[in-house]
Structures are given as structure tokens and as C-alpha cells.
């Protein structure tokens, strides 16, 4: 009976932490990704830059995120998710605020590079690592929930961002979104994520890859 109660308590705890992680994904995707997509044309209109330039500079964040994801993955293994994803939320919020304050395209592009580091630290790359380490062989359902949460971000944030753009300029909107990201995701990541993980046991039957072998294939 005691074992059953302990198991039920553990499952309840995992469920609450999964809900927190999913909420963090909704806000992180909504701000760090969909913010630029929804506001792109308004940014071009209010700055005089071309939409092609605005979208091209935003893509810097995606490139940086892909490259930085390798280092972030290593940090997650070594330090655990709490510190990495909390700092990632801070970096993402600061970067997004810098985007809002950018006086010219050069600073705008550099600021998106900062955002890219935040993206690598808090979006699917990091969240999927948390779910895999936390749930192990039962990770499929949890991965599906987190994936759906990221997809739900567009449904929730696209109309919100559109409403904000109707009420203020894009810079004010982005500053407010940066504040929302910080206020919501920093405490979520600090309070709900593991401080560190126990080492993963090595299995000789598993095939292990290096970064270079993955890139070659």
C-alpha cells in the first residue's frame, strides 16, 4: 500500500512538472519565435526596412539556435536543466528587449543572435532532453504533450501579439513580450526543473555518436 501511494505521488509530481514545462514552452515559443513572425510586416512598416531584411535578420536567431544547441546539450548533461534553462530564459528576454530597442539593422541582427542562444536553451531542444531524462522509457506521451504545447503557442500568441500591435508600436509590444517571457518562464524553469541529473549508465550495446559523425550523416 505504501509503495502504491508513493508511486501515485511520484506520478502526480511528474504530471505537475510536465504541465509547468508545457506552460514554459507555450510562452517561450509564443515570444521567441512567433513574435517576429506575427510582427514582421509591422516592423518593416514602422522602421522603413524591407520585410525581406526583417525576416532575414530574424533567421539569424534560428541559425545561432541550431549551432548553440550543441553546446547547450552538453551543458544540460553536465549541469542539469534548472540553471541552463533559467539562464536561457533570461538571455531570451534580454535579447528580445534588445531587438525592441535596436536603432538600426546591424544591432537588430545582433540582438536576434542573442535571442538564438535563448531559443537553444529553452525551446524543444532543451525541453525534449528534460522529458527524455525524466520519463525514460515512458517518454512518448510526455513528448507528445510538450510538442502540442509548442504548437499551441501560435494559437494563443498570434491574436495576443496582433492585439498588442493594434494598441502600441512594435517596440512597445516587444518590450512587453520580453517582460512576459521573463516573468512567466524564469520562475517556471527555476522551480520545476531538476537541479542536476544522476549520470546515465553506459551500455555497451548502444551505438554512440560524436558531433562529427552526426554531421557527416
Image (spheres, helix red, strand yellow):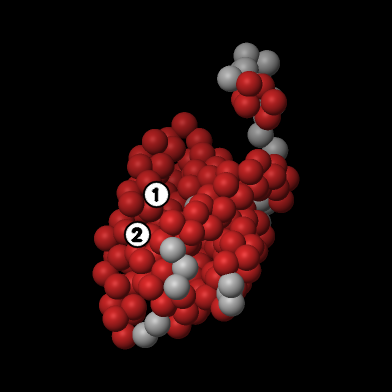
Please tell me which residue lies in front, 108 or 14. Answer: 108
Q: Secondary structure at mark 1?
A: helix
Comes first in the chain, label 1 or label 2: 1
Q: Whole-percent x and y of residue 42?
A: 37, 72
Disc sitting over residue 153 in the figure:
2
Please tell me which residue lies in front, 13 or 31. Answer: 31
- Residue 22: quadrant of the picture: bottom left
Image depth: mark 1 or mark 2 in front: 2
- Residue 97: quadrant of the picture: bottom right
At x 47% / y 79%, what residue is drawn? 171
Vertical position of residue 89 compared to residue 214: above or below: below
At x 66% / y 34%, what residue is drawn? 200
Q: Is residue 155 visible?
A: yes
Please tell me which residue lies in front, 45 or 132. Answer: 45
Q: Which residue is mark 1?
A: 146
Query: In this image, 168 relative to 186: left or right?
Result: left
Q: Secondary structure at mark 2?
A: helix
Amino acid at each position: 500500500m505504501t509503495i502504491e501511494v508513493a508511486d501515485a505521488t511520484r506520478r502526480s509530481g511528474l504530471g505537475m512538472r510536465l504541465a509547468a514545462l508545457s506552460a514554459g514552452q507555450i510562452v517561450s515559443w509564443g515570444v521567441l519565435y512567433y513574435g517576429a513572425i506575427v510582427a514582421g510586416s509591422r516592423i518593416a512598416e514602422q522602421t522603413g526596412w524591407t520585410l525581406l531584411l526583417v525576416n532575414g535578420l530574424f533567421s539569424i536567431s534560428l541559425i545561432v539556435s541550431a549551432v548553440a544547441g550543441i553546446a547547450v546539450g552538453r551543458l544540460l548533461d553536465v549541469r542539469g536543466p534548472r540553471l541552463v534553462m533559467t539562464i536561457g530564459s533570461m538571455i531570451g528576454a534580454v535579447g528580445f528587449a534588445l531587438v525592441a530597442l535596436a536603432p538600426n539593422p546591424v544591432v537588430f541582427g545582433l540582438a536576434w543572435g542573442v535571442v538564438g542562444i535563448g531559443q537553444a536553451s529553452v525551446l524543444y531542444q532543451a525541453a525534449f532532453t528534460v522529458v527524455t531524462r525524466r520519463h525514460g522509457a515512458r517518454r512518448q506521451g510526455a513528448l507528445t504533450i510538450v510538442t502540442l504545447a509548442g504548437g499551441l503557442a501560435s494559437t494563443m500568441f498570434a491574436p495576443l501579439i496582433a492585439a498588442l500591435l493594434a494598441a502600441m508600436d512594435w517596440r512597445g509590444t516587444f518590450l512587453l513580450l520580453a517582460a512576459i517571457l521573463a516573468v512567466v518562464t524564469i520562475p517556471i524553469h527555476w522551480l520545476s526543473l531538476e537541479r542536476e541529473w544522476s549520470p546515465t549508465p553506459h551500455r555497451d550495446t548502444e551505438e554512440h555518436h560524436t558531433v562529427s559523425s552526426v554531421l557527416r550523416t
